[in-house]
Amino acid sequence: MNLIVAQLSQAMRLFLQTTRRVFQYAQMSECYACNQLIPFLKQHTKRAQSASRGFTGTLTSNVKPPSNWLCPTCCELLLTPTRVGCRQCALKLGPRVLNFGWSYCRHCKPTPNPQIKTSVLCDYIPPWSNWITRLKYGNEPEIAMMLADLLAHRLLLNKKDLPDVLIPTPISPEKLKHRGYNQAQLIADHLSKALNRPVMNNVLIKIHETPSQADLSKEQRQSNLDHVMLCREKLNPTLIIGIVDDVITTGSTLKACMSACMKAGATQFHHLAISRTPEPFVSIE
């Protein structure tokens, strides 16, 4: 009798172990950076928590932790240390500038505007640039949720500076028809849920088609969007407007959107984007 009980007990333990392993495998996700499988239980290990500590801020039920998208190794490589950028344009500040105590880059420091703030998650470099390219041109809209979640974590570090309302940068009807979605609107929709802020879709529109910004020089970009954007609703001047985009290159698109919003009554802005194109290296000989 004791032998039968022992055999049944051992069989039950094996069954529970097998069930647990099957459950864990079913809960696996794949790291977006290295494609390594991330078991559900390992998404909350000390290493994963340590890799994103100081980055996640105060989590909400609508925001997934970085360890849900990236393995612990990639969390360490991609999310630390925290990026420090110019308050006004988000251009990355080097250690020498930081040692001087500057909060603006050399372009914005001569004419700082305290009513304008810009926050980005990262520089436009791999793998971030690869993900954004796949989002825009690879018909992978699901990437927007991952990028928006990671940006939301960064913003939650300084919750008092969050915008009051989100407005995505518009694209032309032709591009929308060809692509099937506006990537900035997808990011804004996910940020709206993560940050508990309303999003105003289709308020800012592009009133006529222009050449693609990607094919133009800096000077051409700045003149390409003159008088192109239109805000179709009046905006409360006491609200901080969060204009959302995927990439900031020269800032021409954000300036055009901001100009249209100012004509509608807005006075304060907190631009949000996933990445910022680094300043070209200039060799001094």
Image: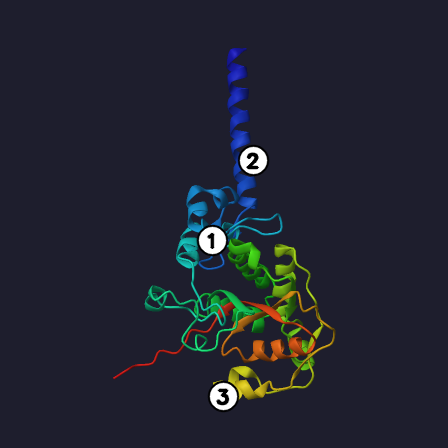
Tell me which label, 2 or 3, sits earlier in the chain: 2
- Above or below, comparing residue 73 to residue 109 in the picture: above
Identified by mark 2, the residue type is: Thr
Residue 15's spot in the image, x, y percent?
55, 30
Look at the numbered disc 2 and give the secondary structure of its residue.
Answer: helix
Q: Indicate the amino acid at tag 1.
A: Phe
Q: Quadrant of the N terminus?
A: top right
Label 3 belongs to which residue?
219
Q: Nearer the viewer, residue 32 or 255?
A: 255
Q: Which label is found at residue 55?
A: 1
Q: What residue is at 60 percent from the left and 80 percent from the top? A: 256
Label 2 neighbourhood size at 10 Å, few (<14), some (14-19), many (20+)?
Answer: few
Q: Is residue 279 left or right of residue 232?
A: left
Q: Looking at the image, which is closer to me, 38 or 121? A: 121
Label pair 2/3, CB-CB below 8 angstroms = no
Residue at 68% across, 81% down: 174
Residue lying at the far right in this picture: please name it: 233
Which secondary structure lies at badge 3?
A: helix
Q: Nearer the viewer, residue 138 or 53?
A: 53
The alpha-carbon separation of the residues under discs 1 and 3 comes to 36 Å
Q: Amino acid at mark 3?
A: Glu
In this picture, residue 27 sits left or right of residue 230: left
Apparent side of residue 182 relative to residue 71 in the rendered image (left or right): right
Say how many tags the image has: 3
Residue 140 on image: x %, y %: 59, 66
What percent of the width, then of the height, locates residue 79? 44, 57
Q: Earlier in the sequence, mark 1 or mark 3?
A: 1
Name the residue rendered at 50%, 23% in the picture.
10
Q: Quadrant of residue 189?
A: bottom right
Q: Which residue is mark 2?
A: 19
C-alpha span from label 2 to label 1: 35 Å
